[in-house]
Structures are given as structure tokens and as C-alpha cells.
Image (tube, rainbow, N blue to C red):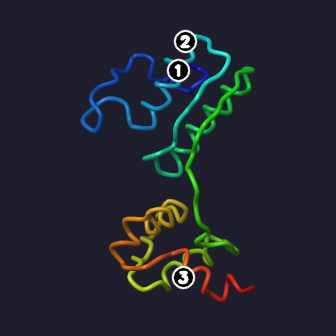
Amino acid sequence: MELVELTSLREALVGLPGVNGLSIEQRKRMTIAVELVANPSIIFMDEPTSGLDARAAAIVMRTVRNTVDTGRTVLFLLKRGGQEIYVGPVGRHAYHLIRYFEEIEGVPRIKDGYNPATWMLEVSTAAQEAALGVNFTDIYKNSELYRL
């Protein structure tokens, strides 16, 4: 429980997904803990961060790091393939990143106080591309930023 940072929840009920009990991120860490009980020398993980926001993904990845620090080998698939949709300065308070994406027609503006990394991941999904009728990779490759 300590290794996966769930000590504070040792008395909690797992519950039903989306109804009560542990959050998705806590469930993923609990799944890792259950696998660790068998004390395997190697652990395979398929997209342990899928479905998580940036904060929850960071917690799960810290759990993976804690596991590696015990001498175990961890192999995981995060995503296959991938395309660049933004490579450039982030800026103070992610100013440049936000400005770049908000200039793309149809991309919703970031709400005050919202995490810029999470916002960027949400507005640039394949579903958003389809809904907006855009291709973020093509937009980036045709941008002034790409030519720099």
C-alpha cells in the first residue's frame, strides 16, 4: 500500500466504477498493488495512464517509478505511434501553448484556473479533430512555428 501511495485508503471500499469508492486513478494503483503481491520480477502494463488527466497520470507514473526503485523491471506501452501537434515554447503560465491552440478555429478557450496541460490534451483528441473537421498535425506542419 505504501509503494503505490494508497496507505491513506487502506480501509476504503473499492466500490463500483463511476458510482462510488476509489477513483479511476486509485483503481489503477490498486491493480498495480494486487500484481505486486505476487512479487513478480517483471511487470507488464498496457497503457496504465489511459483515461487519466495529467495529474492522475503523474501519480500513476510515480507509482511505476516507485516499483522500479524496488528492483523490479516494468515494461509498459503508453501509446503506439503519435504525431507532433505542437513543439515550441510553453511560456509563463503556458501562454504560448494556449495562444497557439486558441487560434485554431473551433478550439474552445481555456477556462480561468484550468490546468493548461489537461486542457491541451482535451482539445486535441482525435474526437475533437473529427468534431472540428481539423487535423492538428497538418495545422502544426503548416504553421510558422513549425518552419522556425
Please name which of the two marks, 3 or 2, marks the residue nearer to the observer.
3
Q: Earlier in the sequence, mark 3 or mark 2?
A: 2
Q: Mark 3 points at which residue?
A: 139
- In this view, the residue farthest toward the bottom is 144
Looking at the picture, how far across and down is residue 119, in whole percent?
A: 47, 65
SS under mark 2: helix
Residue 33 circle label: 1
Compared with 57, 28 (above or below) is: above
Let me know if residue 6 appears in the view: yes
Looking at the picture, how far across and down is residue 83, in whole percent?
A: 59, 66
At a point 39% along the width and 76% down the height, the residue shown is 108
Task: Give the alpha-carbon distance from disc 2 to disc 1, as whole Å.
Answer: 6 Å
Residue 37 circle label: 2
At a point 70% along the width and 25% down the height, the residue shown is 73
Q: Is the N terminus in the top left, top right, bottom left or bottom right quadrant?
A: top right
133 left or right of 67 in image: left
SS under mark 1: helix
Task: Give the alpha-carbon distance from disc 3 to disc 1, as whole Å.
Answer: 42 Å
- In this view, the residue farthest toward the front is 81
